[in-house]
Image (cartoon, rainbow, N blue to C red):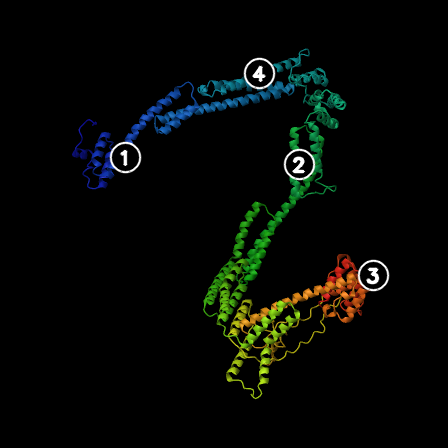
Amino acid sequence: MNSTSKPFDLASLDALTSGIFNAPTSGERSARLREWLLTEPSEDLMSEVYRELSGRDKGVAKLLKEKLDDIKRLHGQESLATEWAQKAEQLLQAPRLNIADALAWQRDAAKAGAPLSREPLAGFKQRLTEVVKGVEDLQHQVMVQREAAVLLAQRIEVLSTKSLAEALGGQTGLQADVAQWQNQAQALTLNSVWPSVDLKYPPQLDAAGKQLQAVWDGFSAAAGVAALAQSDASAALPPVPVWADEIRRLRGELPQHATQAAESVKPAKAAKTEPAEKPAKSKIDPAQRQALREQAMAAVTEVLQVLEKQLTEAQEASPAEATVALRHALKTHGKHLDTSLDERLHKALTAGGDAEGWQRWLADQVRTELVTQAEALLDANKAPTVGGRKMQDKLRQLRDSWKQIDQGGLPNHALWKRFDAACNEAYKTVLAWLEQMKKESADQRAQRVALMDEVKAWTAENAQSEDWRAQLRALHQFADRWRNAGHLSEKAFGEMQGQWKGIFKAAAARLEAAQKASIERRQALINEAREVGAAPALRVDAVKALQQRWQVEAQSVPLDRKTEQKLWEVFRAPLDEAFQRKGTERPQAAGPVSAHDRAVIDASKALDAANASGDAAKIRAAMAALDAALRGQALQAQAAQSAATSTANPVAAPTPDASAETQGDEASAATTAAEAPADEQASEAGSTEAESDSASQEQPAAPVVAPKPAKPVVAVRGDDRPGQKRAEAPAGRDGRRDGRPGERGARPGGDRGPGAGRFGDRGAERGGDRFGDRAPREDRGPRLGDAAFRAQREALERAEMSLRKLAAQAHGETLGRVMTAWQERQAEALPTVQELGKGVNASTRQAWAQAVSAEPKTPAATALLRLEMAADVPTPADKLSERRALQLQLLTQRNQPGPSETWAQDVAQVLSGPHEEATARRLQNVLKNLLRS
């Protein structure tokens, strides 16, 4: 069918397409369409079916539409393939193929959408690729042939510097190589793609062939002349200097004189065209070598003297010609010279304008330095001056430096022998070090193996142990021993490290499990602490129990320090918040202030006012008034005054309520005194709770019993030698009142009786005898509320600090007046006895005044040393020996008074001497301590 025929009717189309139009469902219609397309119907028939089907079922018609689009695309690609096939044929049939055009064809065809993967374009693409590859290979072979020609020319030049016999022997092989090169170059030009080679390559190959041919022709001609001259004594010498000298020696002649070579250098071009003759490298006898050396010395010395003469006379003519002549002479005879002229040659060449100088002399200087360094590796006793590792590296560096020098200059066998002997001698220490390192490595490996076995045995031994702290300590020790076990090679350490990790992990498995369980238990305690802290009423007993359980857990299973500290902070946070909340709520819940608390608060304010005045007497008086208020003496005085004014009223008996309240308060005080804090956190909780309880209770004033004064300390056992540290006497009361148990500001142990503090005395712990009778306790006054307690405590602290500052200030002023009176020699300027303190009486001050007012005497060095010993202050470094001698002298004078007993007289002796800055500074340091005592 063609497009000019009538359109098909639906029945005929359905018959031709296997019933597509009569299919009951779209899926079946799609299946029948696929089966019909497999029969490859014509394009016209498919177009007619698509036209009828597109209005009935667009989904199935889409499949047919895609098939029609593929056919149209195929027709378009066929036209493109024909077009690009013609272009490729034109490129291949051209006499010269340009590589750029071939690559552009492939690129442009791909852009146009031509089917390069199908025939015929695939075949053309393959042919063009092969042609391009052949051209590139041919160009590469041309470059290789050029390099081969250069190497052959170099071989010919090198062979011309060899002996005549060696040159004639290598001529045959060299001739074969040249012929082979020429054949290969000819084969390149006969290649089918040679016309397509880049235009720059054929001239390069041609030039390389001509140059090689010219060098080979010259060599062959010179070899023929040399062979003829070798057989015929009358024949001309060859133009090669080495062969010419060899033929002269065979004929019994000597080489030409060096002066003729120097004169032939005058134009520079002649020097290039007629090179100087070089000595042969063939082996010669000692007599001939000596003759060559003498000849070289004579030739070089003559030219050297001419150059030195020109440099000395400073002629107008430049010494460039003489310098060139000397350089040429050295080039010819340098190998036969000894080292006696090296320094002169270097200086002459440098002065003549030659920047390089005599290279052999410079190289020998560097070699000498290397020899010196190599010999310095061992001292005079053949002991190494550096360690094994540094010795090995230094020897390697020195030998590498020597190799670099030998590559660029003439060798020096004498220096080489010295250098090699020194390096070999030093390398013996390297061998010993290597053996030692090998032995140490074996020992360290054995030590690590033994440590792993020990850890295995320890793991088996402690499989049932519950002492986690000891296990943690042992594991830390094992880890430290492994870390400090010594150095191993990386390979050996890597192998053993894996084994060690497995063994150590097995050893620490039980401890890690216990730590994990302990962390879980501590988390449970943290949750309980949060519940206790969140409760409306804080229970101190519950807090103490929690803290006790935490301490037991912390002591039983140790954790990492950072982890344990973090858990502890999380645990105590809710408890601290609860106590802080309770402290904030306490003032709000406090009742009216009692008369006793009001008296204490007023006394605290009066103490603050006296503290602000800066008068020590007022501060002490205010402190006494506050102490009286604390003990209830102020209220007693008011009560006594009111009792005296009332003449007829008898003393009323206490009411039952008051007596009951008093008994309840005594019972509460007794209960509080019996409690002792279990640990740091419990003590804080207990003190806060006690303060809360005290704030809500008010107590009437009780009769005050005057405290019995403590018996002063008369003597203390200790070391009575001068200069030794003296034992401190037991401290008495520190000025703080004995507060309630756990109360801040109270002196520790203040709640105990007279018998408290004796170790092992059970009755002392109860404050009574062994039968339980409690000794009478000192009355400390009624209980204070929280506001009154804090006010008096803070006021006392500020007052004590002010008194200390005033005392230090007064002490400094007094000490300064003493130094001024001594310097000006004025006894009236000395402070009074009261200002000097209780350690100085009137007679002592009178003695000091007499010493100051008298004329200066000899400095009392011994008295100043005794004062430093009495005050226990350091002595200047230049006087230490005198102080030690004085201490030894005092040890022999047992019945004489010590420095601490005679310090007042020693001060008088020092003051009777002249005033010197160093002495005054030492005396001031002494009096700082002595006047305070």
Q: How crowded is mark 3: few (under 14 residues within 10 Å), some or many (20 or more)?
A: few
Tag on residue 66? 1
Residue 692, horizontal then vertical, whole percent: 51, 72
Q: How crowded is mark 4: few (under 14 residues within 10 Å), some or many (20 or more)?
A: few
Tag on residue 398? 2
How much space separates mark 4 and mark 2, taking CA atoms? 46 Å
Q: Residues within 10 Å of mark 2 (few under 14, many from 20)?
A: some
Quadrant of the rendered structure where residue 396 is? Answer: top right
User: Residues at badges 4 and 2 in contact (C-beta under 8 Å)?
Assistant: no
Decide which of tag 4 and tag 2 comes sooner along the chain: 4
Amino acid at the residue labelled 4:
Ala
Quadrant of the rendered structure where residue 844 is? Answer: bottom right
How much space separates mark 3 and mark 2, taking CA atoms? 72 Å
Decide which of tag 4 and tag 3 comes sooner along the chain: 4
603 in relation to 428, above or below = below
Q: Name the residue under label 4.
A: 214
Q: Name the residue under label 3.
A: 858
Residue 888, horizontal then vertical, whole percent: 79, 63
763 in relation to 867, above or below = below
Q: Which residue is drawn at 71% across and 39% down?
A: 376
Left or right of 435 in this view: 465: left
Decide which of tag 1 and tag 3 comes sooner along the chain: 1
User: Residues at badges 4 and 3 in contact (C-beta under 8 Å)?
Assistant: no
How much space separates mark 1 and mark 3, taking CA atoms? 131 Å
Along the viewing direction, whichever of 662 and 34 lies nearer the viewer: 662
Q: Residues within 10 Å of mark 1 (few under 14, many from 20)?
A: few
534 in relation to 81, above or below = below
